[in-house]
Image: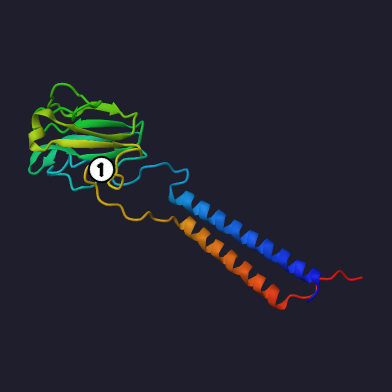
Amino acid sequence: MTDGRADVSRRGFLRTAAGATAASAAAGTATAQEETEGGDGGGGGGPPDLGGFLDGVGNFDGSVTDATGQDTATVQVGVDNGGQPYGFGPPAIHVDNGATVQWEWTGNGGGHNVVSDGDGPLDSGSTTSSAGVNYEHTFEEDGIYPYVCVPHEGLGMKGAIVVGTDYPTKSSGGGGGESAGPPEVPNSAKTLGVATSFVMVATLGLAYFFIRYGGDYETPE
C-alpha cells in the first residue's frame, strides 16, 4: 500500500493503538497503586507498637491475641506470670472498636485491680480477690490502652488492649519499632499489571504487523 489514503489509515491506526496502550497502562498503574495503598480497606493492620510497655512481663511472648470480630473478649486476672499468679491473660489483646473487654478474676494472687497506665479510661477501683468478672469496659476509640494492677505492677502485672485499626504500629513509628520493608503488592494488583502488559505487547505487535504487512484500504468503486 503506497497511496496517501493508506498512509493516513496507518497513522490513524497507530494513533489509536498508542492511545489505547497509554490508557491501559495508566488505568493499571492507578488501580495497582490504589490497592497497594489499601483501597477502601482503611488503615492499620500492622503489628502494634506497644512501646516496650510489656517488656519484661513473664507471660508476654511478643504476640497480641486477636479477638477482633467478637463483641466481647475476656482477660483473666491473676494468671501465672513467671511462676507467680500476678499476670493478665492474655497480656495483650486486639479487639474491634465498640467491643467490650471483661476482666475475669481467677481468685489467685490476692487482691487485684485494673487501672490505666497514665491517662486512660480504665479504673476498676479498689482491689478485689473475688473470682469472677469484676470489671468491664467498652472501647469506643481506636488506639492502644496500657494498664496495670497497681499493687503488683512492680511484679510485672501489666496488660494492653489494642483497639480498632488506627493505632501506632512498628512500621509507622512510635517508640523503637522495627524498620518497615517494602509494601506488599496485592495479588489483584499483580494480575492487573500482567493483563495491562499483555495488552500493551499485543497492541504493539498488531501495530508492527499492520505496518509491515498492511494491505490496500481503498474504498472499492
Q: In this view, does 126 lie above or below 80?
A: above
Tell me: residue 196, above or below residue 122: below
Question: Residue farthest to the bottom?
Answer: 213
Left or right side of 91 for 22: right
Q: Which residue lies furthest to the top in this view?
A: 126
Residue closer to the observer: 147 or 78: 147
State the image coordinates of residue 18 (x, y, percent, origin top left): 64, 62
**Amino acid tagged 1:** Asp
Residue 102 quadrant:
top left
The outermost residue toward the right is: 221
Horizontal and vertical percent position of residue 142: 33, 34
Front-most of residues 23 and 69:
23
Give coordinates of residue 170: x percent, y percent: 27, 46
Dot 1: what SS?
Answer: loop
- Res 198 → quadrant: bottom right
Count neighbours of disc 1 (C-alpha within 10 A) and say few if under 14, some if 14 to 19, many if 20 or more. Answer: many
Residue under the point 36% across and 42% down: 44
- Camera-side residue: 79 or 39? 39
Which of the image's four quarters has the C terminus?
A: bottom right
Tally of marks: 1
Residue at the disc numbered 1: 49
The quadrant of the rendering that contains the N terminus is: bottom right
As drawn, is 84 to the left or to the right of 163? Answer: left
Which residue is painted at 54% across and 64% down in the image? 197
Question: In the image, 21: left or right of 110?
Answer: right
Indicate how the structure is coloured in the image.
rainbow
Residue appearing at x 12%, y 41% in the figure: 80
Give the image location of residue 162, x and y in percent.
Answer: 28, 37
Q: Is residue 15 above or below residue 104?
A: below
Describe residue 95's horizontal placement relative to residue 88 as left or right. Answer: right
